[in-house]
Image (spheres, rainbow, N blue to C red):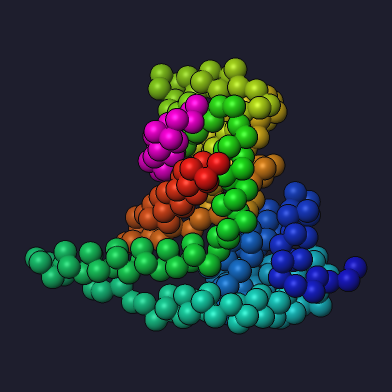
Amino acid sequence: MMPAKTAEEVRLQIKREYDGYSKQLRIVAQYILDHPNEIGLETVTVVAERMGVQPSTVVRLAKALGFDGASQLQRLFKEEVVSGAGALGYKERIRQYQAPKSGGGSDHFSSVLDEALECGILGLEDLRHSMSAKDIAKAVQLIQSADTLFVAGFQRSFPVAAYLSYALQRLRKNTVFIDGAGGLYEHQIEFSTKDDLLIAVGFNPYSDQIVSTLDQAKRNKMKILGISDSHVSPVVVGSNAQFIVHDPVVRGFRTLTSSMTLAQAIVLAYAFNETKA
């Protein structure tokens, strides 16, 4: 088997073959999809430690993809990073950023605020480089063509889904917010049709509610727009359009900075596209 010639070809190959990988190889494959810059810039030992696997597991996946070793695989992602100066700048800032030490009093609160702001800025820069106008246009087209929108998001995803539902209703789009009140989330989508769209928001760990909602949507042959944190997330696998968002973590708490900004961008794009129509 001839190995892929670009990082994008590697991603497509992994998605095609993912279901056939062992549990350990899936961990490496998902990491490659979700953290391509680190694969290109860090050593095999470092990325293996972050994944919680042995370096030999990374090598095994590289060979399964047709490469002689991990260095060939990494070179493709390094070339991709170097070709995008903005992404490299983002990575270098992540390397250099050091969280301030916790203290007490006003200094402590200032350091927390500074850390939250810095991490938010870094997350937004990552969003800028990972999203494209083509992705936004596809989302807008799906929203416009749907008879009814169903919006679902539970646990940490709930605020993002709630905002999307609120904003799209204000734009006079027929929208149903699947809030799961009374445990009725499956019934809230039960009578959807193939002419409707489910906007599903879900981040790891993926709730049983979002998985069940997606299963019902697929049974009803709905179109799906997924917003998640992994290319192999159940929220985006089999979707008609997808957005992968990595929200920054501040002192162990995962933020929603990037996810909310993406939701606002989708709403704004839809609103102004409707104005032109």
Q: Is residue 105 found left or right of 133 in the rendered image? A: left
Q: Is residue 156 found left or right of 68 in the rendered image? A: left
Q: Is residue 193 above or below residue 33?
A: above
Point out the residue furthest to the left here: 105
Q: Is residue 275 found left or right of 54 in the rendered image? A: left
Which x, y percent locates residue 33?
64, 61
Residue found 50% across the figure and 37% down from its top: 207
Residue found 40% across the figure and 38% down from its top: 167
Which x, y percent locates residue 176?
48, 26
Q: Give the number of callouts.
A: 0
Residue found 75% across the figure and 79% down from its top: 72
What secondary structure do most residues of the magenta stretch adopt?
helix
Residue range (magenta): 155-175
Which x, y percent locates residue 151?
50, 33
Q: Quadrant of the C terminus?
A: top right
Please tell me which residue lies in front, 224 or 202.
Answer: 224
Q: Is residue 207 found left or right of 137 in the rendered image? A: left
Point out the residue furthest to the front here: 276
Residue 223 visible in the displayed image: yes
